[in-house]
Amino acid sequence: MRRIGTIAISACCLLRSGAYAADTDIWFQRHPQPPVWELTPEEFGFLNPPGTHLDYTTPGCGDYLEKAFTVYLGRYPAYAGDNADRDALFQRWQNYAEISEVSRLPFCLTAPYAYQLKTLADAPESAITISYCGRYSGEDSTADDSRARALIDEVERIARRGSVSAFSSYLELDGDTEVVRLNPDILYFLKQSLMNASPILRPDYLFDNERVWADDAWNRPDLEQQLSPKRKAFVDDAAARNDLGSVLATTGPCGDTAWREAD
């Protein structure tokens, strides 16, 4: 994939920022997953065995989530308590992982689906007829339509929860295929939210005008001009809260995309 691979390089350093995070479990607020700089040498080696790398093309990034959960149980054995149902414990933890400040967790829950959409759309036999701009245009009429919708929906679902890593994967859906052309207000929201992240930790690589993203729609100098002053104020307020849902709920229908290619 043209760009998702580069995200994998930077994912270990990116944290979620902002106040918006849906349904945060109080246990995990008090007992967060340890970030990379707080891992013991043993924990780090367990998560990152020598000679291996994060396989961002595989759901869950292979066994990374399971390993991260094992590290969590080792850190906080009280989390399990008397509950011997590891699957139930893992599902509760994964719900937290979607909005964790340890970015590899939400990254591994979103980026592989963006990659799968790219692979599906680029296949010579692809039969995708729908398109997506923050809402769908067209009706599912093929199996590929249903598969594409399921992949987009999963990335969108997690991005709605406010994770910056998920925002990055959601933004990366845009432009890699003809299937996804996000509306300008959504692109603007994502860019503002990502740039609102900590100056040290925000994903500046997405906005580097000398790299592969230079010509992408979110880096166009006239992006902001596509929004009315009223809409821009609304989106700025939503971006301050990482509240993607409010922007998606009020975005317009898919429209003219000529501005993306204009000189």
Image (cartoon, grey):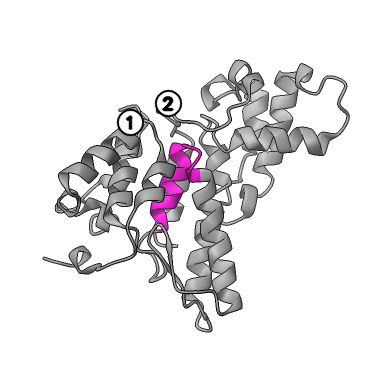
* Image point (71%, 39%), residue name: 66
Along the polypeptide, which appears first: circle 1 or circle 2? Answer: 2
Q: Residue 26, image x and y in percent?
A: 63, 20
Q: Is residue 164 magenta?
A: yes
* Image point (62%, 32%), residue name: 96
For residue 127, above or below residue 147: below
Could you tell whether 248 is left or right of 46 in the image?
Answer: left
Amino acid under label 1?
Ala
Could you tell whether 126 is left or right of 40 in the image?
Answer: left
Q: What element carries label 1?
A: helix
Q: Does the magenta stretch include residue 258?
A: no
The kind of secondary structure the magenta stretch mainly shows is helix
Q: Tag 1: Cα neighbours inside 10 Å, few (<14), some, or many (≥20)?
A: some
Residues under numbered marks 1 and 2 in contact, where contact means CB atoms less than 8 Å apart: yes
Residue 212 in view: no
Using the rendered view, name the quadrant where residue 32 is placed. top right
* Image point (50%, 58%), residue name: 114
* Most distant residue in the left direction: 263
What numbered label is drawn on residue 240? 1
What numbered label is drawn on residue 201? none
Q: Residue 41, image x and y in percent?
A: 63, 23
Residue of label 2: 19
Magenta-highlighted residues: 159-173
Whole-Å distance between the Cαs marked 1 and 2? 8 Å
